[in-house]
Image (spheres, coloured by chain):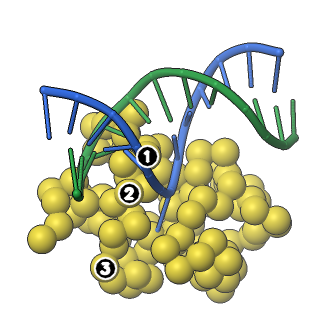
Chain colours: A yellow, B blue, C green
Amino acid sequence: MPKAFDEAVWRLLRKIPRGRVTTYKRIAAALGKPGGARAVGNACGKNPRAPQVPCHRVVKSDGSIGGYAKGAGKKISLLRSERVGIRGNRVLELKKIIFRF
DNA sequence: ACGGTGACGCTCA
DNA sequence: TTGAGCGCCACCG
């Protein structure tokens, strides 16, 4: 059975539109845990219905891709398929496509 | 209770 | 700019 924290994270993930992304840090802050970015990553990793629940739209605060249960490469293809610009291990124009809760 | 781990973040050399 | 170091939270044995 999932923990309450995990559910809370997944609930926020569902609000991120296609073609936009957010960061682990922002999700943590939105949940009232400003220093809990790492814990958010853990919760994303346990997400049982990806990519229905778009955990692939969560990147690091500096714009680098971050991890993914099925491999970072998979995460990148998913983002590209939503027209998110990526170069190397970085999303382009993060400030312009980031989703603010 | 205790210590280790991890899809992170910030600072500083 | 890039990497090492250290701190953070939630979770697990």
Residue A79 in sight: no
Residue highlighted by disc 3: A48
Q: Using the rendered view, name the quadrant where residue A83 is placed.
A: bottom right
- Marks 3 & 1 on one chain: yes
| Chain on which label 2 sits | A
Q: Are marks 2 and 3 in contact (CB under 8 Å)?
A: no
User: Which residue corresponds to mark 2?
Assistant: A42
Q: Earlier in the sequence, mark 3 or mark 1?
A: 1
For residue A26, side relative to residue B9 (left or right): left
Give the residue at x 33% y 83%: A49
Q: Position of residue A20 (x, y in %)?
A: 56, 66
Amino acid type, mark 1: Arg
The CA span between labels 3 and 1 is 18 Å
Disc 1 versus disc 2: distance between alpha carbons? 7 Å
Q: Amino acid at mark 2?
A: Asn
Callout 3 crowding tier (Cα within 10 Å): few <14, some 14–19, many ≥20: few
Q: Residue at x 16, y 60 (%)?
A: A3
On residue A38, which mark appears?
Answer: 1
